[in-house]
Image: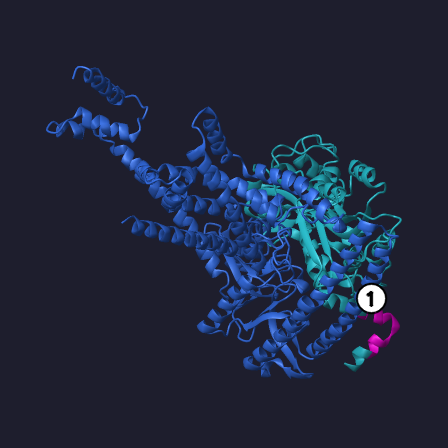
Chain colours: A blue, B cyan
Amino acid sequence: MKAKEPKKRKEKRETEIPSVDEDSGNHKEPPPETAEVAETEKSPPGRTGLRASIDFKARGEPFVWIMGGALALGVLMIIGFLALVLWNGIVTFYPGPVEVVTLKNGKKIAGEPFRSESFRPSEDQLKGVDPESRRAIREADGFASRTLYRIGNFDVYNEDFKWAVAHQVAKTETPPGIFFVERREWGPFIGFIKTLTLDGRSVPGEKVSLGTLYAAHDEAVARREAVRSIEVDEIGAINYYIEEDRLALRRTELDYGKKSAEYHTEKEKFERQTKERRAGFTVLKKRIAAINEEDEKYKITLTEIGGREKQLRLSELVRIYPANDLSFFGKMGVYFSRWGEFLTDDPREANTEGGVLPAIFGTVMMTLLMVVFVAPFGVVTALYLREYAKQGTLVSIVRICVNNLAGVPSIVYGVFGLGFFAYTIGIRIDQLFYPEKLPNPTYGTGGLLWASLTLALLTVPVVIVATEEALAAVPRSMREGSLACGASKWQTIRNIVLPQAMPGIMTGLILAMARGAGEVAPLMLVGVVKLAPELPFDSFFPFLHPERSFMHLGFHIYDVGFQSRNSEAGKPMVFVTTLLLIAIIAFMNAFAIMIRNRLRRKFVEGQF
Amino acid sequence: MSRFSRICGLAFAAAICLVLVAQLAGAALMVDKKLPAYKATSGVSGNVKSVGSDTLNNLMTLWAEGFRRSYPDVKIEIEGKGSSTAPPALIAGTSNFGPMSRAMKSKEMDAFEKKFGYKPGRIRVAVDALAVFTNKDNPLKCLSLPQVDAIFSKTRKGGMKTDIATWGEVGLKGVWASKPISVYGRNSASGTYGYFKKVALYKGDYKDSVKEQPGSSAVVQGVASDKFALGYSGIGYKTADVIALPISKRTGKKCYSPTAKNAYAGNYPIARFLYIYVNKNPNQPLDPLRAQFVKYIFSKEGQQAVIKAGFFPVNAAIAKLDLGALGLGLGSN
């Protein structure tokens, strides 16, 4: 009894310290738990009542409110951000009407209204404005409104957007029969169909039915696809093998020297083979020429609002629709077809149009590859640190280092990845295994492999910390039970500890994945490029090409947002791409969470 | 109709008709008609990597897209982080093309020569007018180069006696007079930064208050959203929200807009060539892949892409000269 006495007193004194602080009006805020303990210590049951209501601070009420408020604020910001991205991303592809604006000076503008704003015109801008409009502006406190129109036809006007100021507009109408034409080059064209030439015969625009137009367009697209397939698959294969042969020859040259017999036989072989392969070209080129000749017979002539004409092959159109005559379902059709193009097509026109398939592929591929590297590495490290290493100063230092690694700016990892992986290891690999390709680097420059490894380094602390926590949470009794049954330490870890810790490890991996997929800065140095339309995965052995640079959705957002010529048209694309990136990360996380839950269930079942 | 054709039949009127036709075709820029259409050859494949200017980033991408239409299996990678990244990549051999929005400095040239023993090949691929942008509501009509210098620079080597910090000091009245000029510019890795410093700042130093942006289009977006802003960027990045100011060489002289005509004639003072540098050994011909890419750049299609990217195309004379320097000819294969 006596021995316990002083300890108890000491405890009491400790818990009393915060409450003393509060009474003296000190603003140093104690952690909430301590405050709560203090409260129970100070006011035992029966004595509460009055005291508690006066000294509400001691009950921790404000802290609960602060915490709740902080949570609410956080949730609100996240919801606000998601709503902004979601809304802007979702409406982007919805086709709007095309308005024809006749200005008071007789000029006409045709375009999709893009956004409106009110502004305060200066005296200069009001010069020559009729008195009526002037009065209206004065009545509106000097504010006037203007609308930005997407006028398209960049090849004709040299601009894509135009402002129309409300007081300069004579009338605005949405005439039927005006078409919004998306082209493979030069962006959209807005105008009327003058003639449609099908199989050499011209039909005037008024007599063209939509059905005929769409059918002819579908055929033209099929022709374009056929040409593309010949170009990419068949000519691509020939080119690929010629290049392989050339490299083989170069390799022989490097191995044996230019004067050796081996080189001569190889060279003859190369020349013969190349000749045969080149013969294949002519056949394919003839096929392409035949298709193109057919294609020439299907043309469309469009006139813009000012009367200037533009003749295009039907196959050059991506999509054509009568903007003002569409029903709701027609609009939805255009909407979903645009999404389809966005998700499955290659980018066009310096990434501002077309799809983002290579970027989606690159992002997913890199993240998965990163998980493949980071998971075993992180788990093994944590296992050793927690289970085998003698807990002491050294392990503590290692642990501190690992935790600090998580705080290193990501661009530093990028620099490290470039300097170490690409320029040190990569160049050695090139010299050893790919000397025939030099001076063109293979691994000696950024690529998918180096990017994944860099990100694996970046995220490994997260996995180590999470795994360590998970391992520590495995009850001691279970290990001891296993050891008592005669299992060795490794058997215990493999069969008891790891399965039990698996959900925690998965959580770490999920966090790592989310961090890795959203990271852009280091990737810019180690392999992400603006344009790399070849997926790092194709039909040529060894199928996966981890040395190739790749596109990434995060970088795509940066590129379209800050680097594209047409930043106005780029903005909506930024939102769509952001939406897509968030969706992909959410999807990958959901998948990992599903696996984790399954593991948990399995474990719960196994326990009983 | 018949009268019209008869008039056109006359020799002197034919010229006028041509002008008329040209005008009907609109203000749209045209590619020099002497530039040949690109003809594809066989056996071109392999990898091309370009590292360099971000001003040329879009244009390189457009060229790559066009080039791949002829050679679907050619792999083209494009990295654009600024002109200063081009020479190191060329020297290290990690890139085949070094697009730059300024000429190589002698130091960079020496480093290249030290490694390879010869100077890099240079081609002039497009003309860019560096525009000084204001917000679309800005009533300013014209700036002289020394004024631009006094706005952007703290050293004022252009000869202005006093610093210019407010819109009133460049002659705006009313609410504008007292408003400070919010200055936007590029980051220092960019060739645009270097070129503007050399020409518009007379090699002086930028003010610390210049907001450095990571991309050409970021400057334009900054100016578009800031009513009292002034910024410089390539004319190709102009949007409907900004005005490209006419610039005069000296205060009081005539101002010229950044148009193709003024840039070609040399009237617009901050127009420049855009370059691509290649590692070309003078004793060996250029390999077919790079040779064809260069030929594509100087073809009709290639120069149309220049217009599409918002720059001004080069003419056939320049194309011929620069192709000749690389041992290639215009048009022929």
Residue under the point 85% across and 76% down: B9
Above or below, A466 against A238 in this view is above
Residue under label 1, please give it. A272
Residue under the point 58% across and 52% down: B241
Verify whether residue A500 appears in magenta. Answer: no
* Local secondary structure at mark 1: helix
Amino acid at pointer 1: Arg
Q: Is residue A553 left or right of residue A27?
A: right
> In the rendering, at what x and y percent does residue B227 appear?
56, 45
Q: Is residue B250 visible?
A: yes
Pick the front one: A153 or B261: A153
> In the rendering, at what x and y percent does residue A122 appear?
56, 48
What secondary structure predominates along the stretch shown in magenta?
helix
Above or below, B3 against A10 in this view is below
> In the rendering, at what x and y percent does residue B263 appear?
77, 51
Pick the front one: A389 or A236: A389
Q: Is residue A521 visible?
A: no
Pick the front one: B43 or A195: B43
- Point out the stretch of residues depicted in magenta: B6-17
